[in-house]
Amino acid sequence: MKTKKFNSFFGLLLAMGTASAVFTACDDNDPQPTLSVAPATIEATAAAASYPVAVASSDTWVATVSTDSEWCTLDAISTEGLTVNVAANTEGTTRSATVTISSGKLSKQVTVTQAAGEAALSVSPTAIPATAGEAAYSIAVASNGSWKATVSSESEWCTISPATGTGDGTITVNVAKNGAITTRSATITVILGSFPEQVITVTQAATAGEPTLSVSPTAISATAGEATHSIAVASNGTGMWRATVSSGAEWCTISPAMGIGKKTITVNVAENNTINDRSATITVTLGSLLKAITVTQAAGKAALSDITAKVSTGGITVDAVKVSIWDYDGDSKEEIVIAKGKYENGGFTLNLLTPVPAQYLEPLFDETPEGITVSNPKATGFGFSEIAAYNGEDNVGEFRYGYESGDTHIETSFTYVDRDVNVTGSFPNPYGDIIFNCSFKKGWNKMYLIESIKSSTISVEISSTEPSGLKWFFDEWVLDYVSPTRVAKVAKPLFGGVSVWLNP
């Protein structure tokens, strides 16, 4: 801190240019000390100049300037004040200093704010031709203020240090090796306030050679469940590579579908609810280069062996569950038990008969409707949707697995087929199309009849993909006879009754 002390005894020396003086401005008869200065603020221009400050004090006073303000100095003029001298501001930013005038316990401050000088900024060179190898280069910065430097986005191969500075300085530019067969460039921008930005272009040479493209792995073996896999892609060009999935493989999606250089493609596969393995091909191309990745997904779950449920009977006593086929011969009938189990602890496990004897199986259709495709026309099957509930020998109700809400009804049929088979397609009905989308494995499967009613249209889909929201129901039987819908064996094919059911 610079200090100037003034006293009236040294007034003559002050007039002769002495660096410091002390002025006595006190009245021994005045018991109250006083101190005042004017002005309290000085708004200085950027040019060198002097500004007077009037001081009135009843005692000796001392003036000091805040540290780090060498550009601001003080000179004494007379017993009535001092002069504040400011050097020219050659920096591109404003600056300030504080002059403190003290007399005993009293003090006053004068704030000096000097306007910014005209900003100046230049760089050299403005272009850097870099070789293909790793290297470092320098940029000279000439400035009268605080500057900041940045590198253009997507130029990770080019870095700078330092990124900020004040006054003159040097920026070191580091470039990584360019393994690509094409040149690349980056832009370094240096700014100082509102002064026009300075731009340096860095252009790095390419590595000689042919373009390359590689992927890993080239084959993905996916399980039947929903899963995510990765493919590493690497290319030495700055050109954009693109990835596509073969048509008809909506169950397999990729992200991203394009990129430059090294990237990772995420492959998402949906759950395979079909009985067959399935495959898709992901193709990555860069110019004339092509790489293929085969995605093979395993078939869906194996056929059912039992049915397990937790379901309340609402206070109705139930101790056993059973599914039967009634084989009629004239007035006599024979019960063939397809599945049975105990009802206990609020639920049951139904052990399914496997295989179901061939004499109890029916063709899927008596005549396959136009628009329906059956992958194995020789397939036969059997299905049931209700599970009879017993209390001793009394049939007291039935269990079923489905969904009911408003105009939507879903019924689950537990279906046995004697071989793997797919049933797909649709055929018209007076109330709306009936859509089949079923994929069965040999043995027991689940089939869902999904009915939606809208106005006069009934939308029906028969699918092997389980919808959400299904739950178990218990229906108490209040009639004293067995409804025909509750005996398993019917004199028509497995799917033969669908159109009849829709046309009462």
Image (spheres, rainbow, N blue to C red):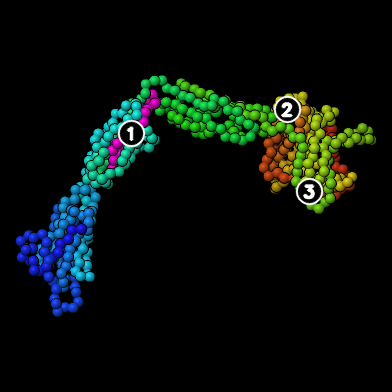
Residue 473, compared with residue 106, is above or below; it is above
Mark 3 or mark 1, earlier in chain: 1
Q: Which mark is residue 345?
A: 3
Work out whether residue 94 or residue 27 is closer to the camera in this orientation and state it. 27
Kind of residue sitting beneath label 3:
Asn
What range of the chain is rendered magenta? 171-192
Label 2 is placed on what type of residue? Answer: Asp
Q: Which mark is residue 174?
A: 1
Mark 2, residue position: 420
Q: Name the quarter where the C terminus is drawn.
A: top right
Count neighbours of disc 3 (C-alpha within 10 A) and say few if under 14, some if 14 to 19, many if 20 or more: few
Q: Is residue 89 visible?
A: yes
Q: In the rendered structure, are the residues bearing label 1 and label 2 in contact, judged by CB atoms less than 8 Å apart?
A: no
Q: Point out residue 187 in the picture as x, y percentages from the top left corner.
A: 32, 35
Label 1 to label 2, Cα distance in Å?
64 Å
The answer to whether any part of residue 437 appears in the image is: no
Q: Distance between the Cα atoms at labels 2 and 3?
A: 36 Å
Of the pair 435 and 381, the residue shown nearer to us: 381
- Closer to us: mark 2 or mark 3? 3
